[in-house]
């Protein structure tokens, strides 16, 4: 009887171990963010992507309040291609707030532009120090990646808090989103985007304008890459025509509701 009990106990321990391993593997399953684009005013969707519950659980951002014609303008700044200064000029003239997600390279290479972003009322977000696939590094390294950017911005500018992170290349897992959240971040994805990140594959400002305007919807989180000449040239008309449609541009700090 004693041997039977010990065997049963060993089996339970083994099963628990297997369960824990399976659970750990599940939380580390990598996802590449994607979504069904908005068309004809309909809302975009992540219902078929398989990660919607993970975003909800970890308080990540996909959409703002879809009952209000609000837009949140976000830029990814991995490196500088000569357009950010003009973008900042335009945002200042039109009184539009934005958030710029920067890497360690950008912070070191373009400190004056980072200072300007903050001084002109924009947010600087965390895009990691070295732009790694976060799902391939442990939590300790992940925290180091984020801390280096946050501390660097804090030392350089008057922005002493950093509340938003954008996972490099849009790759994430339940674990990485949870680790970011535990460190005080909301992970920011997007609901309007197009293939704009390749400077060698620009198709003109009209193309950029059409791509963005065709996807506009209430609560939109727009992703633009500042390396794009097309974006820089189309941005003024995008802002003006979005406002003509009744949209208001807000800072991510003013997002009151997250919708999925």
Image (spheres, grey):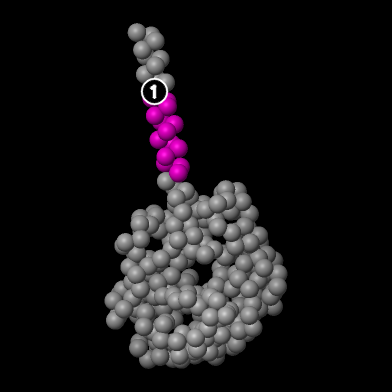
What range of the chain is rendered magenta? Answer: 12-25
Q: Is residue 213 visible?
A: yes
Q: Residues within 10 Å of mark 1 (few under 14, many from 20)?
A: few
Q: Where is residue 10 drawn, in percent x and y?
A: 42, 21
Q: Residue furthest top?
A: 1
Res 154 quadrant in image:
bottom right
185 within the magenta span = no
Q: Does residue 24 belong to the magenta stretch?
A: yes
Residue sitting nearer the eye, 218 or 141: 141
Residue lying at 29% horizontally and 81% vertically, measured from the top left:
40
Residue at x-position 42% and y-position 82%:
212
Q: Is residue 186 above or below residue 230?
A: above
Asked where in the image residue 65 lies, by quadrant, the reply is: bottom left
Q: How many marks?
A: 1
Q: Which residue is mark 1?
A: 11
50 to the left or right of 116: left
**Element at badge 1?**
helix
Q: Is residue 222 left or right of residue 130?
A: left
Percent across and percent down for residue 57 are 39, 54
Q: Position of residue 185 (x, y in %)?
A: 51, 59
Residue farthest front in this picture: 200
Which residue is pictured at 59% across the width and 73% down the height? 77
Viewport quadrant of the N terminus: top left
Observer-nearest residue: 198 or 159? 198
Residue 90, given in percent of the width and then of the height, sits at 55, 89
Instruction: Specify the principal SS of the magenta part.
Output: helix
Residue at x 54% of width, y 63% of height: 168
Q: Is residue 117 above or below residue 19?
A: below
The quadrant where residue 93 appears? bottom right
Residue 154 seen: no
């Amino acid at each position: 009887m004693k041997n039977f009990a010990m065997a049963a106990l060993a089996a339970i321990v083994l099963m628990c171990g297997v369960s824990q391993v399976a659970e750990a593997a599940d939380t580390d399953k990598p996802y590449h963010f994607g979504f069904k684009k908005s068309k004809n005013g309909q809302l975009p969707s992540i219902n078929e992507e398989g990660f919607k519950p993970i975003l909800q659980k970890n308080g990540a951002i996909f959409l703002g309040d879809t009952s209000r014609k609000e837009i949140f303008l976000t830029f990814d700044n991995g490196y500088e291609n000569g357009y950010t200064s003009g973008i900042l000029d335009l945002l200042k003239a039109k009184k539009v707030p934005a958030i710029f997600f920067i890497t360690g390279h950008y912070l070191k290479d373009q400190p004056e532009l980072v200072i300007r972003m903050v001084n002109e009322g924009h947010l600087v977000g965390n895009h990691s120090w070295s732009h790694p696939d976060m799902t391939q590094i442990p939590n300790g390294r992940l925290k180091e990646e984020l801390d280096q950017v946050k501390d660097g911005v804090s030392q350089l500018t008057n922005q002493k808090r950093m509340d938003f992170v954008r996972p490099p290349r849009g790759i994430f897992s339940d674990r990485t989103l949870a680790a970011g959240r535990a460190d005080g971040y909301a992970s920011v994805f997007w609901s309007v985007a197009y293939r704009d990140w390749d400077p060698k594959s620009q198709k003109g400002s009209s193309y950029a304008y059409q791509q963005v305007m065709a996807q506009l919807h209430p609560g939109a989180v727009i992703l633009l890459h500042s390396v794009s000449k097309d974006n820089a040239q189309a941005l003024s008309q995008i802002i003006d025509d979005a406002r003509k449609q009744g949209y208001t541009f807000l800072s991510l700090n003013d997002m009151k509701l997250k919708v999925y």
